[in-house]
Amino acid sequence: MGAAARLAALLLLFVAAAAAAAVGECVYIPYNTSAGVVKGKLNVHVVPHTHDDVGWLKTVDQYYVGSNNSIQGACVQNVLDSLVPALLKDENRKFVYVEQAFFQRWWRQQSDMIKDIVKGLISTGRNGGMCMHDEATVHYIDMIDQTTLGHKFIKDEFGQIPRIGWQIDPFGHSAVQAYLLGTEVGFDAFYFFRIDYQDRDTRKGTKELEVVWRGSKTFGSSADIFAGIFPKNYEPPPGQFYFEVDDTSPVVQDDPLLFDYNVEQRVDDFVAAAIAQANITRTNHVMFTMGTDFKYQYAESWFRQMDKLIHYVNKDGRVNALYSTPSIYTDAKHAENVPWPLKTNDFFPYADNPNAYWTGYFTSRPALKRYVRVMSGYYLAARQLEFFKGRSNSDLTTDSLADALALAQHHDAVTGTEKQHVANDYAKRLSIGYTQAEKLVSSSLSCLSQSGSKSHCPSQTTNFEQCPLLNITYCPPSEMDLSQGKSLVVLLYNSLGWKREDVLRIPVISDSIVVHDSEGREVESQLLPIANASLHMREKYVKAYLGMLPAAKPKFWLAFPVSVPPLGFNTYFISSGKKSASVSLMSTLHPSQGNENSNMQIGQGKLKLQYNAAGALSLYSNSKTQVEANFEQKYKYYIGQDGNGSDPQASGAYIFRPNGTVPIKTDGQVPLTVLRGSILDEVHQQINPWIYQINRVYKGKDYVETEFIVGPIPVDDGNGKELSTEIVTNMATNKTFYTDSSGRDFIKRIRDYRSEWKIEVHQPIAGNYYPVNLGIYMEDGSRELSILVDRSVGGASIKDGQIELMLHRRLLHDDGRGVAEALNETTCFDNQCEGLVIEGKYYLKIDPQGEGARWRRTFGQEIYSPLLLAFAEQDGGNWENSHVTKFSAMDPAYSLPDNVALLTLQVQKIKKMTTTRAASSATTRVRRLLGLHQWGRRRSLEHQRAGEHKDLSALASVDLKRVFPDKKIVKIVETSLSANQERAAMEKKRLKWKVEGPPADEKIVRGGPVDPSKLVVDLGPMEIRTFLINFAPQSGKQLM
C-alpha cells in the first residue's frame, strides 16, 4: 500500500471514528418544559394560539374544510386535528382556542374516544363565544347572545366556565365589552391588540399597556377588569419566531452532528425580545403570543421549537420561560399585588398610521348591517313566541337563526370587511335561519290565536304570512284584492314589556279600504300614494331576490294607528268598504316660484317642520316642549382617496380617507311633493338622481322620521364616494357630542381630542368619526338634538352645531388591509349589474336640556324591537268566534316600568354534568331584565347631579308573579350574563384589582337578592340581571 493510500485509509478511519463518537454524543434530549413561575426572575409566558376568522377571505365552511385555497391556504380542521396529538406528547404544552363556530363543527365529527381525550385536555377556557365578535358595529344584545351560545356549549360539554376575554383582532374596543362582556360574564381580564398607534406609543413610554379598565360610569369600580394590550400585534415577538412548516424563521438547531447549530443565537434572540418587552411592561411577567392567523396547520412544527426554546432559555438562566395561558398570566399579574393605571371610556377610533383611520367600516356594507339588525330584533321576538308555544321535538326552532346571527357578529362579518362572496354567505345563512324561524313564528301565532290555546295547542289551521321585504314596498299578503268580500287579518306582536302605540304602514292596491280593530270598531286610516322611487326599487330588487316581477302593483301606503299590549298581540282587520280611508292631500312646492316670505309648514300635532322658499328644511318647533330651533338638512359626499399620492393609503372597506368634500346641491327646478293627512304628513324630495328622501311627521309623535333611498352611487368619473347626511344648527356645542357604546352607554366625544393622550391630528374628518349603533346627540345648555339610527353607521360632529351620519360607501380601490378587494357592492338582474341601492331611516328629536334621555332609551328600544307583523286571509266567517284577537302573557293590568326592558325570554335546556355541579335537566327559562337609564355621574361647579334622567335613573322593580300570571315559579336562580354560573359564585371568585390614585367617590346602585316568596326583581340604572327560572309543570296545558 502506497503512502497516499495509507493516508486515505487513516483519514477514513479517523472520520469513521469521529462519526461514531458524534453519534454516541447525539442522543435523545428530554426537553424540560415543566417550568412554572419563578419569583425574582423575568417570567416569559409562552402562549400558543391561533386566530381563525369565521369568515373573511373565505367563507366559514371553506376555512374549516380547507377549500378555495387559491385565495388563502387555510384549513381549520387540520389545526384542530393536529393539536390533539401535539398536546398529548407533553402534558406541559398548552394552547388557546377561541372560535366556537369552528370547534363545534370539528367536535361533531369526532369519535367518543377523541372526545374523551379532548375533555381531558381542556382546562378553563378563553372567550368561549361562537366568534370573536366586533365591538364597534354590533349591538350589545347580539354580543350577549353569541357569547351565551358559546358559553353554554362549553359548560354542557366540558363543565368549564371561561374567565378570560381574548379579543385580539377587533378594530378598536368598546366600553361595553369591558364591563358587560367582561365583568358581567365573570371574566377577570381580557387581552387585545388594536388601539390607536399614537395611544400605543404613549402607553409604551409610560408602561401603561396593561391597565384596569373601568368601562362604566354607572357601575364604577365594581365593573373593573384587567386589560392587557399587546405591544405590537398578536403575533410572536420580534426576532423571527414563526414556526409553521413553510415559515422562514430559523428553527432551533440543537443537533451538533448537523450544520447550522444555533442554540446560543436563538436563546439570545428570545432573551433580547423578552427584555425589550419587559422595558415597556410593569412587573416581571411578559406574554409572548406564539401564533397568528390560521397557524398550527401542523401543530408539532410549532411545539417542537417552543419545547426547545423553553428548555434552552431556562438552562441559560437569564429569564424564565414557561408554557402558559392567559389565565395563568392573569393570575401571575394579580399575585404581584400592585396598583395599575386606570382606563376609562373606550378605544375608538382606531388608526394604525397617520392617514389610516379604521372608521370606514362603521358604515361599510350598510345593507348587510341592516339585515343583521332586523334579524336580531326578529330573533328576540321569535324566542319569546317559542317559549309561549312551548318548545317541542319538532324541527321548528330558532337554533338556525341563532347560529347565523352569532356568525354575523364576527369582526369581519357585520363590519363589512370581508370579500363579497363571504358577505353573500353570511346573508345566505341569515336567510336560511330566518326561513326556519319564520315557520316557528307562524306556528306559534297560529297556536296562540286559536281559541282554547291556553289549555292546549289545537290543530293549527291558520296560515300566517310575513313580509321580510316590506322595506322595499313588497308585501304580497297586504296586496290582495279585497273586492270579493275577503278581508285581510293583520296580527301585530309586541316583544316589549310595555304597551306599544304606533302607526302601521303597509302597501295596498285599492283606495276602498276600511280598518277595524279587534273589538270591531272602525279605526282612522290614511292612504298615501307610493312614490315612484319606492316602486322602482321594489320592481328591481324583488326581481333580483326572487327572480320574478311582483304579481301586483300597490298604489298606496295604508297608515293607521295601532295599540298592542306588552308581550302580546292585537289583531286588526282590513276590508273593502264604501266608507274608506282618507286619501292624503297631495301638493307640490316649486322652489323657483317662491319668494323670501313663502314658507311651508307640515305637522298635524304639536311638532311642526317649516320649509323655506327654496324648498329647504329650516325650522323645527314643538309647542308642547316650547322648543324651537333653526336647522338644515343636507347631503354631501367624500371622494375616496385612491392611494396614488405620496402616501399610498386608499379609502376602502376598513379605512376612511377622504380626498375632498363635495356638497350635494338640490336641483332647484325639482319641486317638493307634500302629502298631508289626519295621521301623518310627508315631504318627498328628489335630492339628486341617486338620493331620494322622505321626511315624516306623525300627528301623535314628537320626532321626525327621515327615510332615504340612496344609490346606485355613480362612479363613472373614476372616484369612489362616501355619502353622508348632515344636520346643521346654530347650537353652540363647544366641539362636544355624544355617541353610544354598542347601543348602551353614551360616551362624551370632543373633536380633535383624546382624554388620556395628546393626539396629533392628521385626518380631521376620519379621525373624528365614531361608531353609532343606537344614536348620537349634542347639547348646548338649553337643548339636546338627538338622532337615532336603524343600523350601525359612522357618525361625527365635524363643526359645532352639526351632526353627520355616513349612510353609504362605494369605493374603487382596496385599502391594503388584506381583503384585496374594493368595496364596490353591486346588484345584478336581467344580465346587468349596478351599484347597490339601500333604503333606511333615521329619527330626529330636539328636547329641552336633560329631557332627551327618555326618548333615546325607550324609542331606541322600539327601533331595535319593531312590531312583528303577520297576515292571514279571511274569506267569510267570523274570525272573532274562532280566534283570540288580543293576548298578553302578562297580567292585563301590568306592564314593565318605563325604564326596564326585557332582553331575553327563551327556553333553555341545561345538560346534566357528572364532573361538575349537577344542574337540573328540566326545561328552564333564561330571562334577562335590563335597567334602561344610565346613571352616569356628572359634575358641575357647585353640586353633583347623578343620572341621565331626573326621574328614570332610579331603582326600578319588576313583579315576576304579574309577568307570569298563569305559571307557578318553583325555582329562580340569578346567573352571570351568559347564564353559565350562579351570580353569587361568580362575584365571590372574581379577582379584585388595585388602581392607582385615590379611591373613587362613587354611588353604585344595584338590585338586591330576589325573595323567592315575593318574586320581585329590583334593577339599578343600566343593570342587566339574568335568571334561570323553573316553572311547575302544567299537565295538559301549554305554558303561556
Image (cartoon, rainbow, N blue to C red):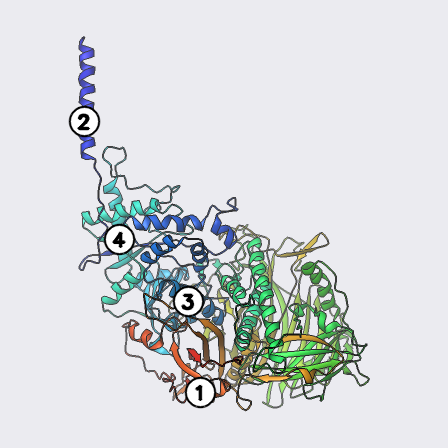
| Label whose residue precedes the other's in the sequence (2 or 3) | 2
Q: Name the residue under label 3.
A: 152
Residues at badges 1 and 4 in contact (C-beta under 8 Å)? no
Q: Mark 4 points at which residue?
A: 92
x and y percent of residue 71 in the render?
52, 46
Does the rendering let one see residue 157? yes
Label 1 close to label 2 by CB (< 8 Å): no
Position of residue 562 measured from the top left corner of the image (x, y, whole percent): 65, 83
| Contact? badges 1 and 3 (CB < 8 Å) | no
Mark yes or no: residue 57 visible. no
User: Could you tell which of marks 1 and 2 lies nearer the N-terminus?
Assistant: 2
Marks 2 and 4: in contact by CB < 8 Å? Answer: no
**How far apart are the alpha carbons under marks 1 and 3?**
29 Å
Q: Name the residue under label 1.
A: 956
Q: Which amino acid does label 1 sit on?
A: Ala
Which one is earlier in the sequence, the residue at label 4 or at label 2?
Answer: 2
Q: What element carries label 4?
A: loop
Q: In which quarter of the image is the N terminus?
A: top left
Identify whether 781 is placed above or below 533: below
Badge number at residue 18: 2
C-alpha gap between disc 1 and disc 2: 85 Å
Task: Pick the residue in front: 174 or 495.
Answer: 495
Question: Disc 1 to disc 4, how far (Cα)?
Answer: 50 Å
Amino acid at dot 2: Ala
> Mark 3 or mark 4, which has the lower sequence index?
4
Percent across and percent down for residue 232 are 36, 55
Q: Is mark 3 on a helix, strand or loop?
A: helix
Task: Find the residue positioned furthest to the front.
Answer: 1036
Residue sitting at x 37%, y 87% = 1011
Of callouts 1 and 4, the N-terminal one: 4
Residue 512 located left or right of residue 701: right
Amino acid type of the residue that numbered disc 3 sits on in the rendered structure:
Lys
